[in-house]
Image (cartoon, helix red, strand yellow):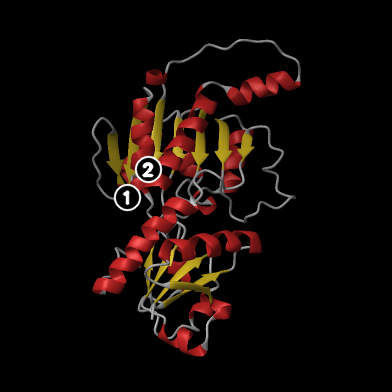
Amino acid sequence: MKPVVPFVSSAGPAEQDVWLTELPKALRTIASVKHLEHLSPAEAAAAKVAIVANPDVRDLRRLPALEWVHSLWAGVERLTAELPEDGPKIVRMTDPQMAETMAEAVLAWTLYLHRDMPRYAQQQRVGLWLEHRLRLPHQRRVSVLGLGRLGTAAALRLMDNGFDVAGWSRTPRTLNGVHTAHGDTGLRSILERTDIAVVLVPLTAQTRELLNTDALKSLPKGASLINFARGPIIDTRSLLQELDRGHLDHAVLDVFDEEPLPASSPLWSHPKITVLPHISAPTIPETACRLLARNIRTYLETGAIPDHVDHSRGY
């Protein structure tokens, strides 16, 4: 008899329906997938691996034999914060398609800033016909903060399109053709020469408000930023101050301290902010399910848990 793998999620019904359609198809030869609420007591007691999508961690306590969880998302900061270090291992979604999708989004919104789209949109609203000097890509320094899988793919895509690319990480990393730096001192040196900063670091205790008042002020006057990581990495109040006083030019924000972004948030109507509804790199069910199925098959055949999150680092 095939083992039963629980699906645990607090996502909306429509999103859960997508996964409960795709996951059983991907795992049909190796396991059955059932929503947690549909497990028998025996199935809940026997489950060693669960598939999770923004779960309520209290639900995971209903699976006493659980050894690991496979997240459908790349970001797992809430799981690492709420699950005990000696609890089930956490495996992030590392679908290569997600890196490609993110790289595409980074390039698209970098070009949006590079080609002065926000300025021309403002001009259209007031009926102003005015051309601005065009800088070439190699004259624009784009700095990618975070050089994991997503950041590396984004940096390479930017390089392929002619931008002067720099990269920052907490620990030393090298990437051919990219000027890299690390640590607190390295962050300041990178920001001081940045025209567009792209935020792709995971949210951890060390990266919360990484871009605080001092960091934002260290960017050159007229710089812009893109946040495709997590909202709390940027001090929103400081960001608004630097935009309002004219030090920073524009911010493209896809992630926020609270999501969905409340209707009362001043970010919605700020003329120097572009708001996106967390769409930069969604998990693609077809490709993600194939990766997840491979990982679970390997575990069922060998007992080997895939590479998992280091609680001390948060990723």
- Which quarter of the rendering shows the C terminus? bottom left
The spot of residue 117 in percent (x, y) is 59, 24
The spot of residue 290 in percent (x, y) is 39, 56
Mark 1–mark 2 Cα distance, whole angstroms, equals 13 Å
Residue placed under numbered mark 2 in the picture: 151
Q: Amino acid at mark 1?
A: Arg
Please tell me whether residue 87 is drawn above or below residue 133 in the rendered image.
below
The spot of residue 295 in percent (x, y) is 33, 63
Judged left or right of residue 189, residue 212 is right
Helix, strand or loop for disc 1: loop
Instruction: Residue 87: give its label.
Output: none
Judged left or right of residue 290, residue 243 is right
Please tell me whether residue 268 is drawn above or below residue 89 in the rendered image.
above
Mark 1–mark 2 CB contact (< 8 Å)? no
Instruction: Residue 170: give its label.
Output: 1
The spot of residue 224 in percent (x, y) is 51, 32
Q: Is residue 303 visible?
A: yes
Closer to the observer: label 1 or label 2? 2
Q: Quadrant of residue 107?
A: top left
Judged left or right of residue 34, residue 153 is left
Residue at image position (29%, 44%) is 182
Residue at image position (67%, 23%) is 121
Q: Amino acid at mark 2?
A: Gly
Front residue of this view, candidates 209 and 280 = 280
- Which quarter of the rendering shows the N terminus? bottom left
Q: Quadrant of residue 200?
A: top left
Residue at image position (43%, 16%) is 136
Residue at image position (25%, 44%) is 173
